[in-house]
Amino acid sequence: MQELHNLSRHGGSLIRVVAAAAAVLLAGSHGYADTLSTSATVRANNSLLVDVQVTTGAKVERVSITYQTTGVDPLVSRLTQVSSTGSTTITIGRLRASRSYTYTVDAFDRDGAPAGTASGSFTTGPLPSALSTNTYTLTGRTTAPLVIVGVNQTGFRGYVGFDLHSSDAPQIVWYYNNVPSNATGVLQVDTIGSIVRERNGNILFADAGTGGPDSLDTFYRAIAPDGTLLAESPPDCSVTPPAASPSTAGWIWGQGNDWHEQLLPGADGVRGTILHLGRIFKDPFFDAGQASQGKRLQVGSAIRRWNPAAGTDKIVWDPFDFLDPLTERTNASNTDPGNNSDLISAYHCAGKSLQSEEWMHANSLQVAPSGVILLSVRYLDTVVAISPQLERIAWRIGRFKSDFTFPNASDRFYHPHYVRMLENGNLLLFDNGNGRPAAEGGLYTRALELALDWKSMTAAKVWEYRHPVGASGGAPVYKYSDRVGAAQRLENGNTIVWFGADINPTTLVPKSPQTYTLVEADASPEAGAVAVLDVQIPPGTGFPYRALPVETLFGEVPAGRGECSPDDRVTKPCTGHGRGVWNYHDQLERAKRGKRRDSRWQPEWPALRFRRESRIAANRPMGGGRHDLLFAGCHWRKTADREQYAGHAGCSSAEVMKTTRRTFALVPTSAFAGSTFAHW
């Protein structure tokens, strides 16, 4: 399986061009039609998913669907190869609730020539009632077209996709409500955790089993964008206290999975397997003669590997072999009293439980551009870089045995989440700030980018975002999120920042209600907000763990683009036709730092420029019968520092028509076939 974070990124403008040229060809071919009929059905289990059925004749090779509701720019589905039976079903999404839509099916033959059209309409249903109890307030507009947020609340445990870019934003345009499992021994709908997205659009997420971050019976599910369950990892947790005393040194008292992070298949080069966080329990204080047997169990954050083909999920990195739980630990006297290595919790495994001190509480993994595996260890205020072979620690930064020093003490981080090394070698992380000394600013949360100097072995802040929530005594007060959160760099240099808690820094009590905040921050060193989404969920519900920016759900893209400057498209919705439409060509041209999102980014090689979806759509006219088009066969320019193609081309309509036919003829049918879960 390949990741899909950058589906539109590598060829969004290209796809729009294919749809436009098809429209040009169609306009001159009204007499030639081989599309027989179409109908649309809103799914009974999801009001924002619509299955469009198309019946075609023998000459039709591929079809696409353009759909629109009043006041919102039209979208074009991915180009789909029709079934040999003549009856094809295409699922479309990114829809508003309780709205009437019209749609048009455009058909093409094997040469890319138009083969007729058919039209229809449908009306979406209401949102799930639980989502209607939440409050969403948006200021500004994001440059990323969509953001997926995890939601754990009464009546809904799953993910919600927001359109935060269009003129009518914020809008919920997609959702997935988790399906029941019996991981706990009881059939129930579990809470959800971390989420990643593959290149083919499928989603891999953590199902938290018993519920929350202390669930050893967590497992992993892969779903298609329409919610179809594709695969899930085997349940693998155990509670195994020794049968005799004294126990063997290093005895494993228990083990299981962790909902905080799972990587994409093959992220570390082992094809078809998934690295993820796990937990392992040992009794090092007893082994060292410092406590009675079983009185001070320690849970460490392990790294595990799920192999779907083999049906196995095994520990491949044991933290007790590399870190010292006796000396490398925090406590109530040197950090947050409620979040430190001495914290005792009950860990659940399919009806059993184990009491243990949570020594590490790791919460993120990344295969960095350099190949090392970065492990964010929250309770140790430390980031550990593990060698690619998992046999040693390559380097560390933070509180314990750091290889880097901080010339400016205020650049230190505390209890971090979501640590990522960028392509330039800098570290981007969500600095929760638990236990931050008053001399360094006290309790506040920020997104932080550190430059690592490998000659002086120093770390220095080069960018940060703090979210202001008021003032006290004339000084600004910043949001304090003592748990969860993420900071994800976009291609245009902006950063999506997710504050997953809302805590009073004086009383350390959650505000009521809590306001969960998503920000797109700009690229200036002391960043400002481009857009802010405030989410309020009824009290007593689980906190949202992650927010994931994406550019498309089913491969759909805007059918056109507005007439406004690149700067306007980044900071506000455009006016006139096509306002608010995502244009990734402009985003690439305005890339302020030349950084990719993180190591999950994968290049779209020239041979894959069509991204298995050749479409054409109109861009702005240039005059003289020419259009500003991004299309294979026209003028291409390679963007610096990116193994992908970006830019624009001036092509006449005749050139577009010729290139369209040539391209459709040259691209093999297999290039349009969607990847499946089995391609691991």
Image: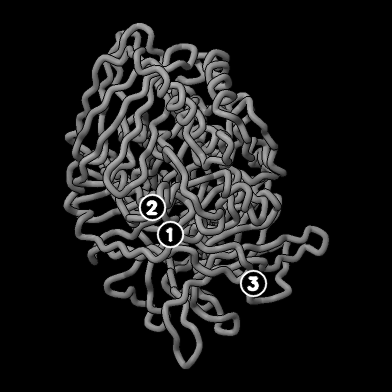
Residue kind at label 2, given as amino acid type = Ser
Residue kind at label 3, given as amino acid type = Asp
Question: Measured from the top left, where is residue 579 in percent x and y?
Answer: 42, 51
Residue kind at label 1, given as amino acid type = Arg
Dot 1 or dot 3: first in sequence order is 1
Relative vertical location of residue 468 with respect to residue 224 in this rendering, above or below: below
Q: Which residue in the structure is indicated by mark 2?
A: 166
Dot 1 or dot 2: first in sequence order is 1
Disc 2 on helix, strand or loop?
loop
Disc 3 on helix, strand or loop?
helix
Q: Are marks 1 and 2 in contact (CB under 8 Å)?
A: yes
Q: Give the colouring mode of the picture.
A: one colour
Dot 3 or dot 2: first in sequence order is 2
Q: Which residue in the structure is indicated by mark 3?
A: 411
Question: Measured from the top left, where is residue 337 in percent x and y?
Answer: 44, 75
Q: Are marks 3 and 2 in contact (CB under 8 Å)?
A: no
Q: Which residue in the structure is indicated by mark 1?
A: 141
